[in-house]
Amino acid sequence: MKIDPTITWRAVEEAWKKETNPLHKKLLGEVCTHMKTEVCGELEPLMGTLTDEPVYHMWGQGPENGPKGREAVQAFYEGLIASGGTLFAFDVERIIVGDGGVITEGTLRNCYGGEMIAAMGITEVNGEPVDPNAKYGSEAHLLTVWPNAGDGKLLGEDIFFGTNSFENLVKLAPEDEPVKPNLADHI
C-alpha cells in the first residue's frame, strides 16, 4: 500500500478547474486549499479556509464529537501536524458541490508508527508482533461534508468513517511510507 499525500487534492483541484458557478468554485477552492495546507502541515493558511468559529463532527472512529471553536480546532490541527498525522492520502472518488457546501467521498490511507499502534493495545498485525520501529498503513472509507459558512468559507468538517481503519493494518515497506510534500510545489 503506497501512501501518496499529494493524491488528496487532485480530484478536488480538477473539479475546481471545471466549475463555472462562482460560489461553487470558491467552495471547491477552499476545500482544495484546506487539503493542501493540512497535508503540508501549514497551519496558518489551513485555518484561513475556515470561518471564525469552526465546528467539527467526527463519526465512526472517534473522537465522536470533534473540536468546536477556533481555539479548539487550531489546537487539534497543531497536535495533528506535530504527530505527523496529516501525512495521509485521501483518494477522492466522488465530489458533490452545491450552495450548502461540498461533499467528498473516497478511500483514506493513513500511516501510523508501531509505537502508536502498540500504545492503542494492538499487539499483532497480520499474525506478526507489532514492530515499534516500523510504520503501518491503514485504509478506511471516508465521507466528508464541508459545510458553507455562508460566505464561501468552510464552517468545518463533518467526517464519517465507513470502516474502521485499524481493522486492516499492514506493515509498510519504506518506499511506501508517505513523504511530506512542500506546499510551494503545489500552489
Image (spheres, helix red, strand yellow):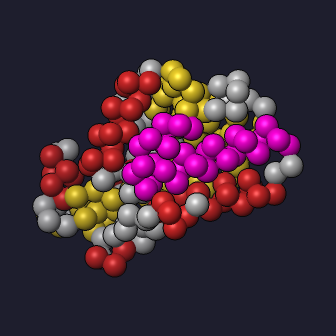
Residue 97: quadrant of the picture:
top right
Is residue 32 rendered magenta in the image?
yes
Q: Is residue 17 above or below residue 73?
A: below
* Count of labels in the image: 0
Q: Can you give x and y, in whole percent of width and height, for residue 68 in the image? A: 44, 21
Residue 161 visible in image? no
Q: Is residue 32 above or below residue 75?
A: below
Answer left or right for 46 relative to 95.
Answer: left
Q: Can you give x and y, in whole percent of width and height, for residue 179 in the image? A: 37, 68
Residue 120: quadrant of the picture:
top left
Answer left or right for 122 relative to 104.
Answer: left
Q: Quadrant of the N terminus?
A: bottom left
Q: Which residues are magenta?
A: 21-49
Camera-nearest residue between 86 and 168: 86
Residue at the image point whose x is 38% and y is 57% from the top: 87
Is residue 93 rendered magenta in the image?
no
Q: Quadrant of the C terminus?
A: bottom right
Camera-nearest residue between 119 and 11: 11
Camera-nearest residue between 74 and 158: 74
Q: Can you give x and y, in whole percent of width and height, for residue 4 in the image? A: 46, 68
Residue at the image point whose x is 47% and y is 32% from the top: 59
Residue 2 visible in image? yes
Q: Is residue 26 above or below residue 1?
A: above
Q: Is residue 37 above or below residue 186?
A: above
Instruction: Label the magenta part by its dominant secondary structure.
Output: helix
Residue at the image point whose x is 55% and y is 64% from the top: 186
Q: Can you give x and y, in whole percent of width and height, for residue 171 in the image? A: 28, 68
Residue at the image point whose x is 43% and y is 56% from the top: 40
